[in-house]
Image (cartoon, grey):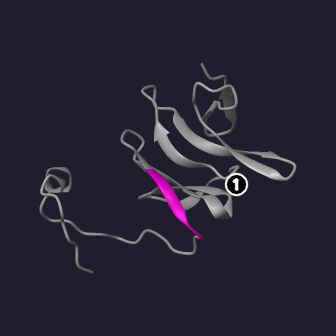
């Protein structure tokens, strides 16, 4: 596999000896990868598959949350909590939820065992 670096600033992040490694296969469409720098795991979403997965060097890829309510857009807040967008299902409709000033949006925070929605400002 050939790697093309289009912006030299990339080298300051990954160095000159860049190698790509396929971690797993069999997903529908992955997105929202986020690395936890202290716990050393990669969390990512397979939104069409309604599945969140987590990779560790020791354990490989395992289910983190299924169903995931079509979660994606993963990131961490300053306290280290996983934040993500998720679908809110209503009969005949699916909506995305995220933090926004509008009353129809909310921030959803995730923990290892549950999701705890908070109200938006």
Quadrant housing the C terminus: top right
Residue at screen point 51% across, 45% down: 74
Left or right placement of residue 60 versus residue 50 in this view: left
Residue at screen point 58% across, 70% down: 27
User: Where residue 14 appears, x then y in whole percent?
Assistant: 20, 56
Left or right placement of residue 108 versus residue 76 in this view: right
User: Where residue 83 appears, x then y in whole percent?
Assistant: 54, 37
Residue nearest the viewer, comparing 58 with 80 = 80
Left or right placement of residue 85 versus residue 89 in this view: left
Query: What residue range appears in magenta?
Result: 28-33
Residue at screen point 65% across, 30% down: 106
Residue nearest the viewer, comparing 85 with 94 = 94
Which residue is identified by label 1? 66
Q: Is residue 30 magenta?
A: yes
Residue nearest the viewer, comparing 74 with 90 = 90
Q: Residue furthest front?
A: 102
Q: Does the magenta stretch include residue 25?
A: no
User: Where residue 95 appears, x then y in whole percent?
Assistant: 71, 45
Residue nearest the viewer, comparing 5 with 96 = 96
């Amino acid at each position: 596999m050939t790697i093309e670096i289009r912006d030299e600033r990339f080298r300051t992040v990954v160095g000159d000896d860049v190698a790509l490694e396929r971690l797993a296969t069999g997903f529908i469409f992955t997105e929202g990868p986020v690395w936890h720098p202290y716990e050393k795991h990669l969390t990512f979403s397979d939104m069409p598959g309604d599945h969140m997965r987590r990779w560790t060097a020791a354990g490989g890829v395992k289910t983190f949350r299924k169903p995931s309510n079509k979660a994606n857009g993963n990131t961490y807040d300053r306290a280290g909590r996983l934040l993500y967008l998720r679908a809110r299902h209503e009969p005949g409709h699916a909506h995305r939820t995220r933090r926004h000033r509008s009353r129809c949006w909310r921030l959803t925070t995730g923990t290892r065992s549950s999701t705890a929605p908070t109200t938006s400002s």
